[in-house]
Image: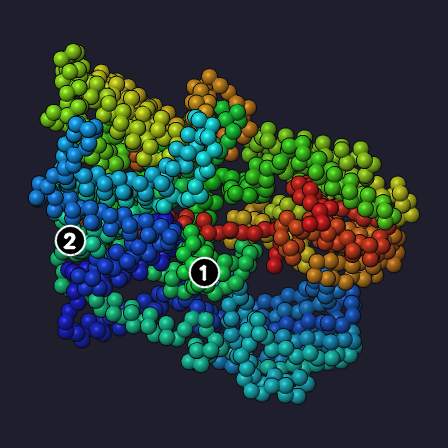
Amino acid sequence: MGEHLKPNQTMNKKRILFSIFLTFLVNVLAIPLWTKCGYSSFVQTLFNKEARLEFVYTGAVTGDEPFHFQSTPKPFYSSWYYGREDDAHRACADLCYKAGGKWQKLSFLLNARHDGEVKMLIKGSSTQDEYGNNYPILTDWRNIKINGEVISNTSGTVSNEKPFCKRIHIKRGEYLRIEAEFRKHRFTIHDFIFLERGSLWFLITGNLLIFFLIYRLLSCLAERRERLRPSDTLLLVFFFPCLFLPMINISDAVKSVRENRVLAIKPKLEEILKGDINTGGGYEKWFNDHFCGRVALTKLHDVFRNKISEIVRTKRALYFKENGWEFFNPIVQGWDYRPHFMQSIVHNLVQLNQFCQQNRIKLYVLEVPRKESVYKQLLSDKYGFDSKEFIKVSQAQENIRKEVRKHHIPYVYPYEALSSAAQQDFVFFKWKHHWTDWGAFVGFRELMKEISKDFPDIPVSSLDDYNKTQSWLIRDEYDRKYNLGWHLYQFFNNEGQDDPPNRALYNYYNHKKGENMVLKIGKFTKDFTYPEGKCKVILIGTSHNENFCQFLPYSAAQTKYIRLNMNQVGEVDQYKVLKLYGKDILAFKPDILILSISTEDLSRLRNLCSIK
Amino acid sequence: MLFSSTTFLFLFLPIVCALHLLVRKELKDYVLLLASIFFYAWGEPRYVAVMLLTIIINYVGALWVARFNSKKKVFGFTLLLGEHTKLNCSFPAAKLVLLLTILGDLSFLFYFKYFNFFVENINALFGGHIDFIKVIMPIGISFYTFQAISYVVDVYREEVEPQKNIYKLALYITLFPQLVAGPIVKYHDVADQIEHRTVDFEKVAYGVKRFIVGLAKKVLLANTLGAVADKVFTQPIDQLDCVTTWLGAICYTFQIYYDFSGYSDMAIGLGSIFGFKFLENFNYPYISRSITEYWRRWHISLGSWFRDYMFMPIMFLPLARNTAISRSYRWVMKKVGSKVANAIMTFIALLIVWFSTGFWHGAGWTFIVWGLYNGFFIFIETLTGWNRDRKSIGGKALQHFYAMLVIILGLVIFRSDTMNYAWHYLLTMFGAERGETMYHLIYYVDRIEIIALTVGIACSAPLCSKMLEVEGRSQLRIAAVNLWLLALFILSAASIAASTYNPFIYFRF
């Protein structure tokens, strides 16, 4: 280094050869690094072990398997699953086969049990990068034939994101023979130039730099063999490249799936040159979100934190390692309990009621209690949490309920019912703040008690009307897919707990007459039509209502569900119900309007009737 | 740009290191100068002008001071006080230029740091309505102003030659390792290094090690303990109890030490990587047994700056020939004796120095009180001889207990936003007041914080003081230390990266 470390003037043959060997070695050792540098397809495809085929039935709802395979090569992994709610429970078969360097033949014999259409998808395997985006792992395919007819005889390359897709019409009893050949994708220079995110020139430059660095280091070591301390040399050799690593591949990802947010964008040069205060701030945010190895480092940090802490805490959440319960941090979620603040909430609810009365709509307010309140004993026992702040806030919220009821607005707060139901089964998910199907049913029952007073004819489902299934996964989101529980993974950045010891088995309820329900899904709305129901109901509320919609729409003839906390508008504006949805409400002409929000969102109701 | 930010660590530092390593020796200074200006402009480009102006003022000022010094030039004028009364005044020209240069330096500091404080107090005292100025204090202005003053005073005292090359002077004032948080490098300490310095393997290796130690101190200890202290000190005072207030005060005591000494370590390390040798800024201050000793170990560069450029000149004032101060001093000495006169002079000097020390730390009454509080204990210790070494273990323990108590209580004042908060906080600490506790103790500390506090307390004693020494150490020991440092570096980097993890949970895309 510095003045002392000047390279040899003459090139030494042996040293060159040794440097080339070490460069090769560094390349092999640095395969994970090349992946991070944007050569993910090459590296991942190198280790690719599978090719995937999906057969998706897209015909009418059948209630059983719409097709089955008379013969298939034995896959190393296969699954049958029913699709999402908006797919109307359509069936899908997923088959994975081991892929090698040589072409392999596959032959399937498919027997149709119903009329309809099967969508055949040929894909590569699926792996996510550090931002939760999929790597383009590639698989080569050729000679695809259906009943002997050649669909594609040239070889093609597919990935999970860009599959080969062929729609096949099937008739009941028909047999289809599907044949194809596949292998692990073979990379060419063309792929490096046009497919990889990392540049070919960077790869070459990087290797040349590694070579020169190794050569120079070898020269220095040879010159100063006696003075240099090997361990200090190694320290520097490790330290300085470590400083360079994060900048060698600045990610161009727009969003982070893991963090569930859009990443900061790079500021424009003219903004930087404006010369304003904290000019570097925007650039810093961008670099913070995109530097290479960011996720690996954050995970490393969180692994340490999670190992050491008894109660894993982030700014917004607590996770009790002992029993696997996760809660919002009740302190950070602190609440403004000053009188004028509470009055503004009451005032807004009264205004909404007036609006409803003017339009002959009956308003009901359903407040979903906080998980932290229902399980407060658990929280208190484990966290030692007997915060006076929490008690004060709870009292303030109780005052709001009392005030609203004074104005003869039906206000349902099923706290007692949920607390007692919690003795029988989980009313909230352990890793999420949403209530379970059981919790939602208890809330539904309490609400319907109130509604039945005004609408005695309205049918109320019981649990006997439902089929019960079980899963340790969580189903509570807009897409009705099962997931691992976002909070636990997002808050704690905790991938190591894909199968944590304290997971719970949840009961899920699907209505026996689910096929009679007609559902239209909009971007932020769902319209349910159920012929056996009565009345027109508009349900406005937050994400808790996803599970609630397993029950309520089976009581109403038409239900329109508007979800408030979607990010189409800012966090403050999204609760301005009259401003955003006033026209929709009037157009729908409902008999009942249910405002269903959770306690943690209660404070946001102060903007409910704001039209600004 | 903070040393503990990703942009500094993974973008700025490697590029500057690489450029510094690659360019020819005569260009290294320019690389460092440009890097330093870029470093400063990153956060506040508009204030680069203030810094450059300071450089120009001191460059010109020092050249004139040296010129007038060599010629012993005297600036004289005659004041007409009446028709027949004239007053002949003479003043050494060098001293006049020196004072003007210092005034120029301090005027920037006053405007950006203290103007609003004075306005606030004048308004409060006289019921005035003077408007505040909308200005943000330029980062590091307190540090580089003192460095600039040190340069021009050193030239005046003829301890160093004035720097003819403005770029080299600019490098001294702007050098990024010590620009933002010190240490305050005095010109006479680095004058030679600016002209002639070498970068060698050993310096680089030492610099890297020192930088890692500083980074770990800041990121792993100071930030962890700082989170606890912030939680406590942001609570309303009526929601804190005795135990919590002590917890907050102790955590803050160690936070400020590891934060500041961590920055100093990083600065010294970076300096070493670029071939400089900065003087130490901290020397295990929490093992002190008196406040006098504490200030010899804490922020040494600031303490020595005040000693060299303020305390000593004040103490030497009575020795000057035929000045009002010397005449007054001799009169007092005749009246009360030399011992008492000396004590009065020390008291006055300490009062001025500690007022200035407090005021330098921030434009607020809490800082001024904290400064005077320290000065008071030092004066008492000087008078009573409490700061003398005790031989018995009990005596030493008592001294140590006293020093730590004074330090912790002083830092409560330093940390508090207002004197009122500080007062009630201190009362709560000693049980004279008791708030309605809102939170259980586990809200503030968990295992990580307990580990950080334990490690913090242990490392504040010189248990591993010779960890980075390599001379006469076995290769195995050096390798073990290096491995440990690498682990610390990775952990620190992970911790910095973790601060960028910011999940948004309400809604999936």
Pick whichever, A172 or A595, lies toward us: A595
Pick whichever, A474 or B113, lies toward us: B113
Q: Is residue A121 above or below residue B413?
A: below
Q: Nearer the viewer's eye, disc 1 or disc 2?
A: 2
Q: CA distance from mark 1 to mark 2?
A: 37 Å
* In this rendering, position of residue A580 left or right of residue B77: right
Chain of residue at mark 2? B
Checking the image for residue B164, the label placed there is 2
Residue B91 picture location, percent across and down: 15, 35
Rendered residue at 39%/29% (across/down): B365
* In this rendering, position of residue A123 left or right of residue B114: right
Q: Quadrant of residue A189?
A: bottom left
Question: Label 1 amino acid?
Answer: Glu
Question: Label 2 amino acid?
Answer: Lys
- Mark 2: few/some/many CA within 10 Å (<14, 14-19, 20+): few
Q: Are marks 1 and 2 in contact (CB under 8 Å)?
A: no
Pick whichever, B314 or A562, lies toward us: B314
Is residue A304 at all visible to an observer of this figure?
yes
Residue A264 picture location, percent across and down: 50, 58
Residue A124 picture location, percent across and down: 55, 72
Checking the image for residue B50, the label placed there is none
Q: Is residue B358 above or below residue A17?
A: above
Chain of residue at mark 1? A
* In this rendering, position of residue B19 left or right of residue A312: left
Is residue B429 at all visible to an observer of this figure?
no
Q: Which residue is mark 1?
A: A271
Q: Is residue B370 above or below residue A100?
A: above
Rendered residue at 78%/79% (across/down): A171
Q: For the view shown, which residue lies furthest in the top direction?
A: B335
